[in-house]
Image: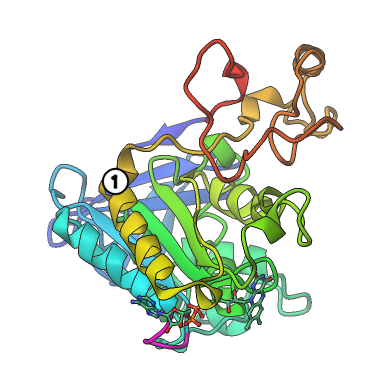
C-alpha cells in the first residue's frame, strides 16, 4: 500500500506536519495530522492514488503533540453514570486519583453530565451530505471526518482518544452491555477512517498502540454470570464489546474490571473492591492484554469468505478448546478468554492466536 510523507505546500505559519496514507484505490484516502494544530480549518494539497494534486479543506481532529514533544502519559475515562454518589463514581474517582499519582494526565468524558447525544444522525455532519436521497451514516461520517466536517462534540471526543494511551470505559452493566449513552459514544466517535478502515482492523487496527478496558458494575452476582449460572457465561456477554468494538479498532484490550453486585454486598466488601482496583491500577499498563484471533489466521478475501485458512483449521482440529470465545469452532470455549489474559506458558499457549 503506497504511503506519502510529503506536504505539497508547506505552511510555515502553522508549522505542522501532514502525512497522507492512501487507504483504498482512487480518491478514497485517509488524511492524518500531527502537530500542534488545533481545531482549525486549513487548505492544503494532497496527492491521490492517481498522483493528481487535489485541494483539500481539512479541520484537524488532532490536538495531540507529536510523539517527540509529548512527555506526559494521558488516560481517558469514558464514564456513564447519572449519580455522583454512585459506586461507579467512586470507582472512577479511584482511577483518576491513582493515575494522576502515576503522573498521568487524566481526561474524563462524563457522558450524562455532558448530555452527550447518543443517536447517530445527520446532525453529526456539518454541511451537505453526499447522498441525501439515501443517507448512510457510516459512509457520510467517513467523508465528513476526511473533510473536517464532523460535529464539534464528536471532534472533541476524537481528540481525547488521539491523545490517550489508555481508555477506561466505566459504566453500570445495562442489559448485558453498556448504557445507551455510552453505546452512542461508540457509534458516533469511532468513525470509519478515524477508528478503523477496511485495511486497518483488529490486530492491524488504527489504535493498535493504545490500550482500552471495560470497568463495570453489575446488579447480578458473579455466580449468576458463570457458565452454569442463571445469566450464562460473562465471557459471551463481553465478546461483542471487547472483540467487536474495542479490538476491531485495534485496541489492545486489557482484562475487564468487574465489580460484582455492589448494591447487594456489605460495605466492607465494597471498600475492598475499591482497594483492589487501586492496587490493580498500579500495574495496569504492564498487564498482558486479552487474546484475540489475529487477522493472519483468516483468508481475507470474498472468495475465501474471510474464514480461517484451511491449514489453520486443520491445525486447530487437535486443540481441546476453540480459538477464542467467538471462534469456538464448535468446541468448548477457551476458559475465561474474555476476562483473563492467557498465561505466558509457551508450551500450553496457542502461539498463532495471540495479539
Ligand atoms: C436499564 C438497566 C439495565 C440493567 N441491566 C443489567 C444487566 O443486564 N445485568 C446486571 O447484572 N445488572 C443490570 N442492571 C443493574 C445495574 O448494573 C446495577 O444497578 C449497577 O451496576 C449498580 O452500580 P451503581 O454504581 O449504580 O451502584 P450504586 O447503587 O450507586 O451503589 C451501590 C452501593 O455502593 C455504595 N457506595 C457508593 N460510593 C461508595 C464508596 N465510595 N465506598 C463504598 N460504597 C459506596 C452506594 O451507597 C450503594 O449502597 C441494570 C440496571 C438498569 C437500570
Circle 1 SS class: loop
The residue at the point 47 percent across, 81 percent down is 81
Residue 154 in the figure: left or right of residue 234 = left
Name the residue at 16% across, 50% down: 70
User: Nearest the camera: 125 or 80?
Assistant: 80
- The image's colour scheme reads rainbow
The correct choice, above or below, for 263 with respect to 178 in the image is below
Instruction: Locate residue 296: give its quadrant.
Output: top right
Decide whether residue 83 is among the magenta residues.
Answer: yes
- Along the line of sight, which residue is nearer the eye, 50 or 38? 38
Residue 303 in the image: state x and y as whole percent: 85, 29
Q: Residues within 10 Å of mark 1 (few under 14, many from 20)?
A: some
* Residue sitting at x 18%, y 61%: 100
Magenta region: which residues? Answer: 82-86
Give percent across and percent down for residue 269.
42, 66
Q: Residue at x 78, y 50 (%)?
A: 228
Identify the residue under disc 1: 7
User: Does residue 17 appear to the left or right of 19 in the view shown?
Assistant: left
Q: Can residue 37 be seen by looking at this rendering?
A: no
Instruction: Indicate whether 202 appears above or below 156.
Output: above
Amino acid at each position: 500500500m503506497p504511503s506519502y510523507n510529503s506536504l505539497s505546500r508547506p505552511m510555515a505559519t502553522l508549522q505542522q506536519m501532514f502525512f497522507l496514507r492512501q487507504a483504498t484505490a482512487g480518491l478514497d484516502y485517509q488524511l492524518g495530522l500531527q502537530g500542534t494544530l488545533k481545531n482549525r480549518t486549513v487548505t492544503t494539497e494532497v496527492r491521490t492514488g492517481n498522483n493528481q494534486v487535489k485541494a483539500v479543506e481539512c479541520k484537524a481532529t488532532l490536538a495531540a503533540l507529536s510523539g517527540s514533544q509529548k512527555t506526559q502519559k494521558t488516560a481517558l475515562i469514558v464514564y456513564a453514570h447519572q449519580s455522583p454518589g454512585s459506586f461507579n463514581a467512586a470507582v472512577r474517582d479511584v482511577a483518576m486519583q491513582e493515575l494522576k499519582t502515576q503522573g498521568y494526565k487524566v481526561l474524563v468524558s462524563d457522558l450524562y453530565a455532558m448530555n452527550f447525544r447518543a443517536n447517530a444522525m445527520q446532525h453529526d455532519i456539518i454541511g451537505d451530505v453526499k447522498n441525501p436521497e439515501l443517507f448512510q451514516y457510516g459512509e457520510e461520517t467517513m467523508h465528513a471526518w476526511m473533510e473536517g466536517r464532523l460535529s464539534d462534540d464528536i471532534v472533541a471526543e476524537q481528540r481525547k482518544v488521539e491523545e490517550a494511551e489508555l481508555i477506561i470505559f466505566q459504566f453500570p452493566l445495562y442489559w448485558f452491555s453498556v448504557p445507551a449513552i455510552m453505546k452512542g459514544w461508540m457509534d458516533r466517535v469511532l468513525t470509519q477512517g478515524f477508528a478503523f478502515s477496511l485495511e486497518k482492523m483488529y490486530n492491524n487496527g488504527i489504535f493498535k498502540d493504545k490500550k482500552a478496558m471495560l470497568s463495570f458494575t453489575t446488579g447480578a452476582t458473579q455466580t449468576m454470570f458463570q457458565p452454569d449460572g442463571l445469566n450464562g457465561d460473562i465471557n459471551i456477554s463481553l465478546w461483542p464489546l471487547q472483540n467487536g468494538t474495542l479490538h476491531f479498532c485495534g485496541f489492545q484490550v486489557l482484562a475487564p474490571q468487574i465489580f460484582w453486585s455492589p448494591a447487594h454486598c456489605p460495605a466492607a466488601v465494597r471498600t475492598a473492591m475499591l482497594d483492589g482496583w487501586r492496587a490493580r491500577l498500579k500495574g495496569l499498563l504492564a498487564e498482558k492484554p486479552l487474546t484475540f484471533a489475529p487477522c493472519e489466521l483468516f483468508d481475507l478475501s470474498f472468495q475465501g469468505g474471510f474464514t480461517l485458512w484451511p491449514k489453520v483449521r486443520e491445525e486447530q482440529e487437535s486443540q481441546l478448546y476453540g480459538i477464542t470465545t467467538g471462534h469456538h469452532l464448535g468446541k468448548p470455549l477457551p476458559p475465561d478468554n474474555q476476562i483473563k489474559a492467557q498465561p505466558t506458558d509457551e508450551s500450553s499457549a496457542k502461539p498463532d492466536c495471540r495479539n
